[in-house]
Image: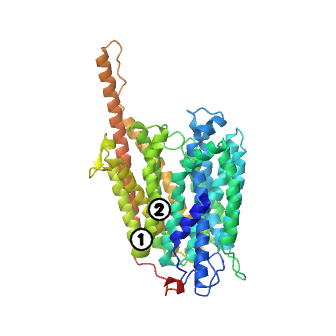
Amino acid sequence: MALHSAAGATAAASGDAAVPGGAADSGGAADSGGAAVSGGAAGRGSRRRLAIGVGGATVLLAALDAYVVVGVLTDILDALHIATNRLERVTPVVTGFLLGYIAGMPLLGSLSDRLGRRAVLVACLVGFAGGSVVTAMSGDSVWVLAAGRTVQGLAGGALLPVTLALAGDLWAERRRAAVLGAVGAAQELGSVLGPLYGVGVAALLGSWRGIFWLNLPLVAVAIVLVWVALPGRARGVPPRKTDVVGGLLLAVTLGAAVVALYNPDPERSVLPPWGGWTLAGAAGAGALFILWEWRARTRLVDLRGALRRPFFAALGASFCAGAALMVTLVDVELVAQTLLGRTGVQGTLVLTRFLVALPVGAVLGGWLVGRLGERPVAVAGLVVAAGGYLLVAGWPADVLQRHYLGFLPRLDTDLAVAGLGLGLVIGPLSAAILRATPSAQHGVASSAVVVARMMGMLIGVAALTAWGLHRFHELTAHLNFPLVFGKPQDEQRRLIDAYREALQSALRTEYREIFLATAVICALGALCALLLSGRRATAGPPSESDA
């Protein structure tokens, strides 16, 4: 049901236009992965809508699984016989998924440029199903569970960039952004529905393991749809070479960075105990990757023929958007629980104001790019997000009672503004990086913009969390728990209330500074977005179905 609805929504957003050159001409052409598209204009338009709808459904499936453990984490802890106050022991489950998600993405994106989108999507879905089986059969071993999630992340992480590259293959530049926005919306929809989906399926099937068993029939349906809907490689087109060594070196670099930056106990230090030497290993592998790419004939990221300024501008803006996104996912729930008196589930519901606005902004951003161009939409989105975070930073203690214009709840509105702004940039950044690179590099280019976003999420939350904890300890260094023994009851209550108020004030200061810093990060992203190409995407004369 989720696959069907996502396919329909993504296909509907793609419109009816055939590709007017570049990706496919009026007589049919091959995509950058060698896919043959033939038939009349109307038939090609329907085939493309079906293909991108199916691709969007696979993206939603992986996105749901990325967030599904959030709602069933306590059940997983019980199954592994881990106390709820020892969450750091399940860190490998989260780190493993992120490790697989980021590390394999560039190489798999490059392989889709060589082997075709359909072959790589099918292979990734098979790998995703295999990871689901390992996860479901993990017993009480946290390491087997982490291994299964790593395989899921490795396979599922490639579905998004390969689908974005598919959109670049099948749609011309002036029509492409709306499709990219719809695919991005499917990804963000997973963050909204994932926790609820996990809770619902676990309740229906009686166990959190049922979530991963359910993936098997869903993947089977997805594989059939992908095989039927997506075009295969064109006959007679020789496969392009893939830089496997470069891909593996970059995978080691990104994987080591993920492990080094993911700290299960940030109160003690910025990095985990293994962070220093792991970062050194990442730097060494990164240096080897750069040296290899400089000398290799076949390169993983080949910038020959690419427009370097918009390429790196899109990566910079995506990095900043990722940092802002992750800070929001972490700190809004903390604000809800520590300052607003909400429980864990209630804190998640507070965050949904932001999460619901993300896919709305993604669809709107894709639509606007076709009319305004990539640069103004990306800049506007990041400026709107910066404004939203400035509003959040100014939340008073009684924010739940505050309203705009007498009827708009301030908390809901501010979070929606921030989410809408970050959603707006998804389509234009994906469109910009595809337009900046040759069609033969669309797979790896789409992977690059997603990897930049994920690295921004990791580095941003690590840095701002460390700063926040430092400031909190600095602000509360002079506070001592009041000694109330032997004092009148009224005096005891007054001292304890004053202590609590001082703690609350310190927390408000800490979160205000964190969200102010997030606004600055969005402003830096807007400066990067100013370097994108200002011209509107054009792709020659319209084809028959553009009329």
Q: Is 235 displayed left or right of 422 in the figure? A: right
- In the image, what residue type sits under mark 1? Leu
Mark with earlier residue (1, 2): 2
Q: Nearer the viewer, residue 151 or 340?
A: 340
The correct choice, above or below, for 527 with respect to 396 in the image is below
Label pair 1/2, CB-CB below 8 angstroms = no
Residue 153, disc: none
Report whether residue 546 is seen. yes
Q: Residue farthest to the top?
A: 486
Residue 368, disc: 1
Where's residue 315, x and y in %?
Answer: 48, 65
Q: Residue at x 72, y 54 (%)?
A: 130
Q: Quadrant of residue 292?
A: bottom right
Q: Residue at x 59, y 75 (%)?
A: 48
Where's residue 234, x and y in %?
Answer: 69, 80
Q: Nearer the viewer, residue 505 or 488?
A: 488
Helix, strand or loop for disc 2: helix
The nearer-to-camera label among 1 and 2 is 1
Q: Is 517 displayed left or right of 243 in the figure? A: left
The quadrant of the image that shows the N terminus is bottom right
Where's residue 457, x and y in %?
Answer: 49, 53
Q: Quadrant of residue 376?
A: bottom left
Binning the other alpha carbons within 10 Å of mark 2 as few (below 14), some (14 to 19) or many (20 upward) gives: many
Q: Which residue is mark 2?
A: 318
The correct choice, above or below, for 528 with respect to 408 in the image is below
- In the image, what residue type sits under mark 2? Ser
Q: Quadrant of residue 331?
A: top left
Q: Residue at x 45, y 43 (%)?
A: 333
